[in-house]
Amino acid sequence: MVETPLRPIFAHACLALCLLLAAAPMVLVDYPPIFDYPNHLARAQVIASLDRSAIFQAHFQQSSFLIPNVLADLVVLALMPLGGVMVAGKVLLLLTFALTLTGAYALNRQVTGQFNPWPLMAAVFLYNEGFFWGFLNYNLGLGLMLWGLAAWVALRHRPAWIRVAVGTAFALAVFFAHLVAFGLYAVAVAVIELHRRATLPQLAVGVAQFMLPLAVFVGLSPSGELDVVALFDFSIPGKIMPFARVISSGNPLLDFATLAATGGALAVALLGGLARTDRSLGLVAAVFLLLELTLPYSMLGSYFLDSRIVVAIALMLMTSLTPRRGMAAAWVVLAIVGGRSYALMDDWRLQDDDTAAVIATLDQVPPGSVIVTAVGHPFELGDWVATRRIKPSHEHTTLYATIRNSVLVPNIFARPGQNPLTFHSSLEALDRAARNPVARIFHSGDARWMVGEMLPLADTAHTITPPIPAVYIIGYHVPCAWWPVDMPIRAVACDPTYSLIEILGGVTEPIP
């Protein structure tokens, strides 16, 4: 006997509980261990204080906001007056989760005709590999894409001008979030319309909503001037590993258990007749899969183009689920999401303590100073089961010095055509240091080279305009013993996992 689907009130309650459970790790820590997260916050902090900071004015320029990678910055800037950049960042993360999960829920309602908890399995994929990398604009764009598709389906019988107007609003929002999300949104609309055998006039209405964003990109956006250099990787690891790492959190055992539980639950539901998939959204997921297998991994100066589509495939598959047993789905979803969040909370608390210790050291650096970052291990691109194994990944932790104390960190994402802020220093040493990924130090010889790179800046720091109070290098997983004792440096902090030195420029003080 088929069980009656859950009443809407119970499905809504399940949605609220899923959001609360998913948000718990972020709410309970001060510094979410998200790779590029400090970059987003620091960039907003620089933009907000550019008119009153001499050191920022000397090395940064505000660029155009008409770029398809800016919405997260705009959200943080809009929220900063309410509680500062740290609060604004947390709200941005929670907003991304809320948009994605409620978007999946709303889109499923439009294609199935009922509210049900099966699409809430998308909550498992909120903490996805791209999220841990810090692809905040892209994840924000996916949430908006789901809401845009829900609105598009809901308005299918309304006048064309209403559909175009609403569709254009969503298309613009997704475009300013991320270009890949915008492309996926256009593809999804096309697949849905073709599946319902839309006429040419109906297809024209669907296309019309994307004209304004495309006009902005071609005619007004500096991103349209970036070199279209496509780099492909058709190797089996390059195309298949992202599926194994779709929810990679740095805890392979937790990730494997979560994927196994999710896959097992879906297999039982589909094979046992407890759920089925909506054909139109299933086709969208299939086309997304083809895109993942054929697109380049790099274009327009952006990376991981193909692999980031994997989470869009997962979200669309979860959204396509139509229930036949609502109560069973509710318990399964809550158990998997709650179990993963509980494990992440323990993991994140430990990383939060580590990050807080580094930030306490960074707080010793005077405002207006310069800190250059180095890391003592290779850049982690991931393997079959994990994106990163070193936790927390401190490559961008130094940018909290920019957020908290107006310290200049050249290793910030501020690139022409890609960000609304650009970094360009007249100081040659700083321009050389503004590399991403950041410099690597694998032995004492590398440490000597890096100190030598910064010595010219330290020698002239007090004579330039505006003057730079001090020049520092922080090395994560770089022991103090590697820094050259015969060069003019001073040890500020020597910790087992990081070291902070000041480049003195003239006076040598041995490192203890």
Image (cartoon, grey):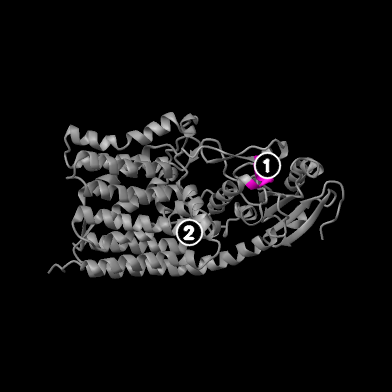
Q: Is residue 316 visible?
A: yes
**Mark sitting on residue 39:** none
What separation in Å lies between label 2 and label 1 (alpha carbons)?
A: 29 Å
Which type of secondary structure does the marked residue at label 1 adopt?
Answer: helix
In the picture, the quarter occupied by the N terminus is bottom left
| x and y percentages locating residue 38 in the rendered image | 56, 53
Main SS type for the magenta part? helix
Which type of secondary structure does the marked residue at label 2 adopt?
Answer: loop
Outermost residue, right side = 507
Q: Is residue 242 visible?
A: no
325 and 213: which is toward the camera: 213
Q: Residue at horizontal 23%, vertical 33%?
A: 204
Left or right, 335 with reference to 158: right
452 and 82: which is toward the camera: 82
Which region shows up in magenta? 52-59
Q: Is residue 256 magenta?
A: no
Write down the residue under mark 2: 249
Above or below: residue 401 compared with residue 226: below
Contact between marks 2 and 1 (CB within 8 A): the answer is: no
Residue type at tag 1: Ala
| x and y percentages locating residue 408 in the rendered image | 67, 48
Q: Is residue 56 magenta?
A: yes
Question: Looking at the image, is mark 2 or mark 1 earlier in the sequence?
Answer: 2
